Image: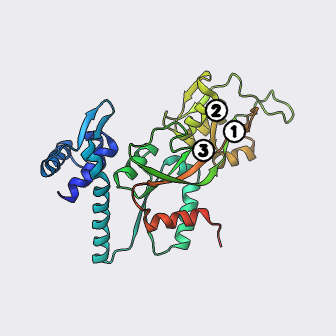
Amino acid sequence: MELRQLRTFEALVAHRTVAAAAGVLGLAPAAVSEQLRTLERSLGTALLARSARGLTPTPAGHRLLPWARRLLDQAEQARRAVTGARAVLRLGAAPATVAAGHASRVLARLAERHPDLKVSLHTGAARDGLLHGVAAGSLDAALVLDAPGPLGALGFTPPPVQLAHQDLAEVPLALVTAPEPASSGDTAPSPAGRRLLVNTPACSFRLAGDRLFGPGVERLRTGGVTATRACAERGLGMALLPESAVHEQLAAGTLRRLELADPVPPLLLRLVWRADRDPAPAVHAVLHAATTPPG
């Protein structure tokens, strides 16, 4: 039983397919399959079974999973002790959290309070990819946007492992559209009859819009925050975006708020990590930096 085989096993549990695990590990799918077969032969039992949901752990696989993470953690601790390397926090941040500006504020406060901590920030993947990275152990934690309630309350499905989370901050949203020349006074325009400008189905702001409007509003796919905001300014429809991304446009009058019967509910910035392991000291540092006011 080798450490690389345990990493492969964890990735397969988190991502459910050989192809997805191979992409995360940077290996060929054939190499991933061979490592799994070798590990199963060495233990004399099947660890994963195919189902309608993809690869799922067998009873033996469930028993191995916490041991795999413990052994991999101990190997990393041994490496740092021998080499004298600084602790590294492998932190994922979905593009939506970066666009909203919250990830940068957390990192700035973390750097101020823990200058000895090295942070490796991963922002290339979307939310689901980052959560799978946490599940597979390639990330220590991830910052994602969600709705109040259990993880995934916004409308996404977390990986099939135990994940813990803590809410760090509210992310206010604004429903905006281009000003209308025919409008008069300070009366805010209504969203009735307008298209909703959206990004991909997995986008946090699109999921928030789905929760707010349901299926009865026409969607027009425009892209990320910058593109969607520009399309809203040009009068192509209404957009649900983070307040921080439209503050200047609202002040300049190139965008205007839309009136709803109830206030637009904010999203939550959440720090997510593996629940079946003690949070690394670096994760505690993020929680402390994010949840305590500046001194």
Q: In the figure, is residue 250 to the left or right of 50? A: right
Res. 215 image quadrant: top right
Q: Are marks 2 and 1 in contact (CB under 8 Å)?
A: yes
For disc 2, the neighbor class at 10 Å (few under 14, some 14 to 19, many from 20) is few
**Residue 26 visible here:** no
Alpha-carbon distance for marks 3 and 1? 13 Å
Residue 150 higher or lower than 139, as above or below: above
Q: Amino acid at mark 3?
A: Pro
| Residue 88: mark in rendering | none
Q: Which mark is residue 212?
A: 2
Residue, disc 1: 264
Of callouts 3 and 1, which one flags the residue occurring earlier in the amino acid sequence? 3
Q: Residue at x 33, y 42 (%)?
A: 15
Q: Is residue 155 left or right of residue 138?
A: right
Q: Position of residue 88 (x, y in %)?
A: 40, 67
Q: Tell us which disc is closer to us: 3 or 1.
A: 3
Q: Amino acid at mark 2?
A: Leu
Residue at figure coordinates x 54%, y 50% from the top left: 97
User: Residue 270, how many percent across, how many down?
Assistant: 54, 52
* Callout 1 amino acid: Val
Q: Compared to 216, does 209 lie above or below?
A: below
The residue singled out by tag 3 in the image is: 148
Q: Is residue 19 above or below residue 24?
A: above
State the SS at label 2: helix
Label 2 vs 3, first from the N-terminus: 3
Mark 3 burial class by Cα count in 10 Å: few <14, some 14-19, many 20+: some
In depth, the one of 286 and 39 nearer the eye is 39
Residue 106: percent from left, percent from top: 56, 61
Give the mark count.
Answer: 3
Helix, strand or loop at mark 3: loop
